[in-house]
């Protein structure tokens, strides 16, 4: 469906033909599919999976249902990196980077990755030296605010077209990668996501609370470090490639917990991965529903899908507390 | 009897960059296998701090804690997890966890890297659930349990951890009386059946006196340890809970609120009616004393009568009633009258 629908309609049969037949009946279709829709679908699949797992890890680590991949300030770090390149570079060199094309794209990608990893390193250092999990959470949120305010300052002194391209980046986009890069992206995120399965036992213990986890023989600091690192790498990769995608990472873990009534993280991680991919594909699909001219920014769709989920979670929690 | 935990010259407290705070000094005590030990102490004497130190959450300021022969500092997290299981005051709140899953997490120190449960593990989990009497709730969500059931599930988790020692921090707090008794009976039964050492801190002195094999009375500079009966013989409780407004009655093993008395009233009689009347009078600051027949006014109690309370004034029966409230009101009236004219 993700391949078939779009502002140019291609029938399913056509899709299959392009994918599995070597001689293509329609060059236009083949171009649209291979160059645009296939990489977009692959990226959406991988990003949804990565963000959802990352969000699940954060929700368990902080034992907070509203935690998500962005709580550690990593996506803000990416925004800061991008802001730095897009907004400042324009000022320094007198022309706008967004108009440079491919080189500019690479610069943005690298900047986002560097920014996200920078913040991740800071958070990891904090996690090692600060005792409580809550302090790490507060530090993450504060670093996020700091980067955002730095970005606002940069915006204030920037060219108008740079601000525009920055805003566009901030809306998120699954379609920025070519097929080659989309494949690498898919492989990398799926590999890291698989690694998260090894954290299952730790996550199960951590969900009981730090003290109980310690009593069960868990080395809290080490496991916290690895969980943050894994979640951070996933978020950083996705944010660098697609921009800051909101809500999927926060909402999907709740869907995963609704689907199977278990607290076992092996199942929850798998659920999150599958549902995350599905949700991201769905959002991508909605964003390009036939009838829209072009495509909606992905973040406006994820918010529409994600916000009701989060609201329903809060609503259920409230009801549970009343009934107890 | 074999001791599972020994503490020697232990000082507990918190370290900080400014030097920290020592909560209790120079404590010495031991836990026996197969016994339920209750840790008692007034608020602020450091019960929780001691519990945290023995379970390895806090480093001791001074002295040693020895668990089955090895010093606690020398043990790593894994070793300690196989020696001591804890039940803490913090409420376990795992979204979506069933009772079975919660108890199964107790097996974590014994399972491999991926946490897979072997058939032995599963058998131990079943046994723990069975022993705690929550077999019918095994598939319920932990969040749907009552406080008492949740506490039992947490105890089952500690049991599944299969350690020679279980330490519980106020497991009976927030429970109603039947649930408290049930939890303590459960812990007693577990200690006897499994030969584990069980240590729990509590404020329920009356229950502890009846159910514990051994008490630890925690004071700032010592732990007084012994069977409840020996401690009663030693008058250990009076000195411990010595405060202005409260008295420990050694004979009943209960606390009495110490009232201040302004007046005395002669009362003739005995029995249950007398006990209740005395209690009501004392609460109002009136001390009952033994009556002479020639007193100006006094109260007589006629046991097994429809109207057991009689108030006599100048050799005349002024009031007869079946209500403690009426007689107390009458006395209060007379007393205030007298105070005005004296």
Image: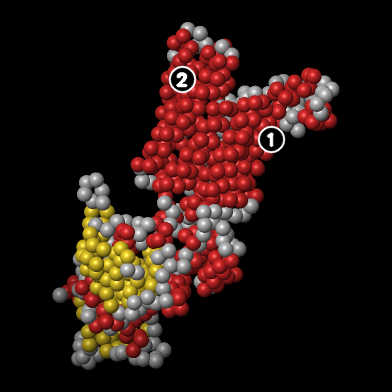
| Pick the front one: B265 or A297 | A297
Above or below B159: residue A236: above
Q: Earlier in the sequence, mark 1 or mark 2?
A: 2
The crowding category of the residue bearing disc 1, from other C-alpha atoms within 10 Å (few below 14, some 14 to 19, many at least 20), is many
* The residue positioned farthest toward the front in the image shown: A22
Residue A319 horizontal side relative to residue A16, left or right: left
Callout 2: SS: helix
User: Are discs 1 and 2 less than 8 Å apart at CB?
Assistant: no
Q: Chain of mark 1?
A: A
* The residue positioned farthest toward the top in the image shown: A94
Residue at x 44% of width, y 10% of height:
A92
- Name the spot of residue A217 as percent of width and height, x first: 43, 57
| Image mark for residue A255 | none
Callout 1: SS: helix
Residue pointed to by mark 2:
A84
Above or below A28: residue B241: below
Q: From the image, which quarter does the N terminus of chain B lie in?
A: bottom left
- Name the spot of residue A276 as percent of width and height, x first: 63, 40
| Pick the front one: A277 or A21 | A21
The crowding category of the residue bearing disc 2, from other C-alpha atoms within 10 Å (few below 14, some 14 to 19, many at least 20), is many
- Name the spot of residue B160 as percent of width and height, x first: 49, 66
Residue A171 in view: yes
Q: Chain of mark 2?
A: A
Residue pointed to by mark 1:
A282
Residue B185 in view: no
Above or below A300: residue A108: above
Above or below A240: residue B54: below
- Which quadrant holds residue B256? bottom left
Residue B202 horizontal side relative to residue B293, left or right: right
* The residue positioned farthest toward the left in the image shown: B342
Mark 1–mark 2 Cα distance, whole angstroms, equals 32 Å
């Amino acid at each position: 469906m993700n391949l078939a629908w779009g502002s140019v309609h291609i029938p399913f049969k056509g899709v299959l033909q392009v994918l599995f037949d070597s001689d293509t009946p329609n060059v236009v279709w083949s171009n649209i599919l291979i160059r645009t829709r296939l990489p977009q679908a692959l990226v959406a699949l991988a990003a949804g999976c990565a963000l959802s797992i990352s969000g699940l890890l954060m929700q368990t680590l902080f034992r907070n249902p509203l935690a998500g991949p962005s709580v550690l300030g990593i996506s803000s770090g990416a925004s800061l990196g991008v802001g730095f390149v897009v907004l400042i570079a324009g000022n320094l060199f007198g022309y706008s980077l967004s108009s440079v094309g491919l080189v500019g794209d690479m610069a943005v990608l690298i900047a986002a990755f560097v920014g996200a990893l920078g913040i991740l390193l800071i958070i990891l250092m904090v996690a090692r030296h600060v005792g409580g999990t809550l302090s790490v959470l507060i530090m993450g949120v504060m670093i996020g605010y700091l980067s955002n305010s730095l970005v606002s300052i940069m915006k204030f002194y920037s060219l108008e077209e740079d601000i525009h391209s920055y805003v566009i980046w901030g809306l998120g986009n699954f379609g920025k990668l070519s097929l080659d890069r989309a494949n690498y992206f898919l492989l990398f995120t799926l590999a890291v996501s698989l690694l998260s399965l090894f954290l299952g036992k730790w996550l199960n213990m951590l969900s009981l609370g730090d003290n109980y986890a310690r009593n069960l023989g868990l080395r809290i600091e080490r496991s916290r470090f690895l969980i943050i690192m894994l979640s951070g790498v996933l978020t950083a990769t996705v944010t660098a490639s697609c921009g800051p995608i909101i809500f999927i990472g926060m909402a999907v873990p709740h869907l995963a917990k609704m689907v199977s009534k278990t607290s076992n993280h092996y199942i929850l991680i798998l659920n999150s991965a599958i549902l995350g991919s599905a949700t991201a594909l769905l959002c991508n699909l909605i964003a390009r529903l036939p009838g829209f001219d072009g495509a909606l920014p992905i973040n406006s769709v994820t918010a529409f899908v994600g916000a009701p989920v989060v609201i329903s979670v809060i609503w259920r929690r409230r009801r549970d507390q009343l009934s107890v | 009897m074999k001791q599972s935990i020994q503490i020697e010259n232990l000082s507990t407290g918190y370290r900080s960059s400014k030097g920290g705070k020592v909560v209790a000094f120079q404590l010495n005590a031991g836990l026996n296998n197969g016994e339920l030990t209750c840790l008692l102490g007034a608020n602020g004497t450091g019960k929780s701090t001691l519990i945290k130190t023995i379970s390895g959450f806090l480093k001791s300021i001074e002295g040693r804690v020895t668990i089955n022969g090895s010093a606690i500092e020398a043990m790593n997290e894994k070793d300690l997890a196989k020696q001591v299981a804890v039940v803490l005051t913090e409420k376990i709140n795992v979204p979506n966890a069933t009772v079975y899953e919660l108890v199964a997490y107790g097996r974590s120190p014994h399972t491999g890297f991926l946490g897979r449960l072997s058939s032995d593990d599963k058998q131990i989990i079943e046994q723990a659930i069975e022993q705690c009497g929550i077999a019918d709730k095994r598939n319920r969500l932990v969040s749907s349990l009552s406080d008492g059931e949740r506490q039992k599930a947490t105890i089952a988790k500690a049991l599944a951890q299969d350690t020679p020692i279980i330490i519980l921090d106020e497991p009976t707090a927030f429970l109603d009386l039947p649930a408290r008794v049930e939890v303590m009976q459960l812990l007693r039964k577990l200690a006897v059946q499994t030969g584990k050492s069980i240590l729990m801190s509590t404020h329920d002195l009356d229950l502890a006196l009846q159910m514990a094999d051994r008490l630890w009375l925690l004071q700032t500079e010592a732990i007084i340890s012994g069977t409840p009966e020996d401690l009663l013989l030693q008058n250990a409780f009076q000195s411990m809970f010595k405060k202005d407004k409260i008295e420990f009655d050694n004979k009943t093993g209960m606390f009495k609120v110490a009232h201040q008395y302004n007046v005395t009233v002669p009362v003739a009689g005995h029995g249950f009616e007398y006990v209740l009347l005395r209690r009501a009078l004392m609460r109002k600051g009136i001390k009952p004393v033994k009556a002479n027949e020639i007193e100006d006014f006094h109260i007589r109690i006629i046991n097994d009568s429809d109207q057991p309370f009689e108030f006599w004034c100048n050799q005349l029966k002024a009031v007869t009633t079946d209500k403690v409230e009426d007689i107390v009101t009458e006395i209060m009236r007379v007393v205030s009258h007298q105070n005005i004219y004296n």
